[in-house]
Amino acid sequence: MGMNNSAEFTKPDSNADQSKAAAIQAKALKDVKATPKQQVVQLICALLVAGASYFVATHYVFQTVIVDGDSMNPTLRNLQSFVMNRVELYFREPQWGDIVVIKDPEDGGLSIKRIVAVAGQTVQLTGGAVMVNGLRLKENYLRPGTKTFSYRVYDGEKFDCAKGQFFVLGDNRGNSADSRVYGPVPRANILGVVVP
């Protein structure tokens, strides 16, 4: 008996394979395509993420502020807009010279002031000058000849900045409600640094 060593091979039906592949691809695309209900849910989720991102950015990172009034003249003028950088003060303490947005301790509103003394320092207003720890403060940002007087006593009023307190003044010393009125402000009232 002889054995037939030849094998028969069938040629693959390329049309059938292509049809099968196309059907699988169509099913996959159908599975991926969102229904109208899913599209609405996706849109709502996208809007919520965008809204949350905007809220976080404007309340914890950057915020536009508009100067309301003349208390910071000549440095900042009424109705000018600036960016308040909140995030910078997460990494460092407020310091001398910073122009900051504060929550006013008297009325709870927002105002822009300059820090002239920090925790542990003593401020004395004497002879129209601001003295910090007994040394006259050099304030080149003020108009020449600007005098700083107390609102409560004629001369020589003294303020101590305790731990976590900052003494703030407006650059327009004749027209600014500041620490001369409400005393040093707590750190919690300093919201951010103004970026001119």
Image: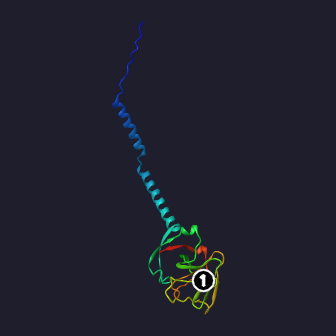
Query: How many marks can you see?
Result: 1
**Which residue is at the front of the view, 140 or 185?**
140
Q: Give the color scheme: rainbow, by chain, secondary structure or one colour.
A: rainbow
**Residue farthest to the left, as pictured:** 15
**Rendered-image quadrant of the N terminus:** top left
Q: Residue at x 38, y 19 (%)?
A: 8
x and y percentages locating residue 13 in the rendered image: 35, 28
**Which residue is at the front of the view, 136 or 32?**
136
**Which residue is at the front of the view, 102 or 163?**
163
x and y percentages locating residue 18 in the rendered image: 35, 34
**Residue farthest to the top, as pictured:** 1
Q: Viewed as shown, does residue 163 lie left or right of 18?
A: right
Asked where in the image residue 6 lies, by quadrant, the reply is top left
**Which residue is at the front of the view, 117 or 24?**
117
Q: Residue at x 64, y 80 (%)?
A: 121
Residue marked by disc 1: 182
Above/below status of 132 relative to 33: below
Identity of the amino acid at label 1?
Tyr
